[in-house]
Image (tube, grey):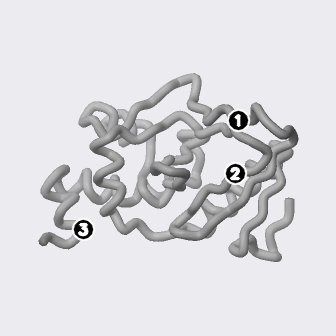
Amino acid sequence: MLPDKALISCSLGKKDAEHFISFCQFVWVQGEPLPLIYEIEDRIYTKHGITSPVLIHFKAIGLISWEPTGYVKTRLGRHTRLFYHGNSTKIQFPQETGNQLDLGYILLTDFGKRLAAVSKATRNQEFYEYVIERWFRQGLVVSSILASRSIRF
């Protein structure tokens, strides 16, 4: 069996594989992998090589779908959990039912999900804190054993 990076390179080519592995550091999981790309040209993404041209290319080769109006996960109860690199983060919404979570502009296709599952992307603490802060500013209560005491909102 090929190592993960080699498997992705065989499917995509070396440069695309490198970009895709970098992209996967922005993937959370709730039943399925969910890339949380909120502001496409934000430095949190671009400094890791994830830019509009790269995302356009990913869409063209069938790795992602891109919705200009964004995606949301709907019909959520009072609490839900998402996982970032195997660690759980609990979100508490303001209402008992009918809540929704903004997922950003990008979703993975089935092909993208299969490749993301073997990508072995590294965890990005700065991105984790970026997402937690974003949820906090939306009025969500977030709890995780990973939340740093130095995070100020």
Question: What SS does tag 1 mark?
Answer: strand
How far apart marks 3 and 2 lie (CA) works out to 30 Å
In the rendering, at what x and y percent does residue 107 appear? 45, 38
Mark 1 residue type: Gln
Which secondary structure, mark 2?
A: strand
| Left or right: where 139 falls relative to 132 | right
Residue at the image position 72 percent from the left and 59 percent from the top:
90
- Residue that mark 2 sits on: 80
Q: Position of residue 72 (x, y in %)?
A: 61, 33
The amino acid on which the numbered mark 3 sits, given as a three-letter code, is: Asp
Residue that label 3 marks: 4
Count neighbours of disc 3 (C-alpha within 10 A) and say few if under 14, some if 14 to 19, many if 20 or more. Answer: some
For the residue carrying disc 1, how many other residues have a C-alpha within 10 Å: few (<14), some (14-19), or many (20+)? Answer: few
Q: Position of residue 34 (x, y in %)?
A: 50, 47
Label 2: few (<14), some (14–19) or many (≥20) C-alpha neighbours in 10 Å: some
Residue annotated with mark 1 = 100
Contact, CB < 8 Å: mark 3 with mark 2? Answer: no
**Of marks 2 and 1, the one in the foreground:** 2
* Residue at the (46%, 49%) spot, across then down: 32
**First reached walking from the N terminus: tag 2 or tag 1:** 2
Residue displayed at 35% across by 55% down: 116
Q: Give amino acid for label 2.
A: Thr
Q: Quadrant of the N terminus?
A: bottom left
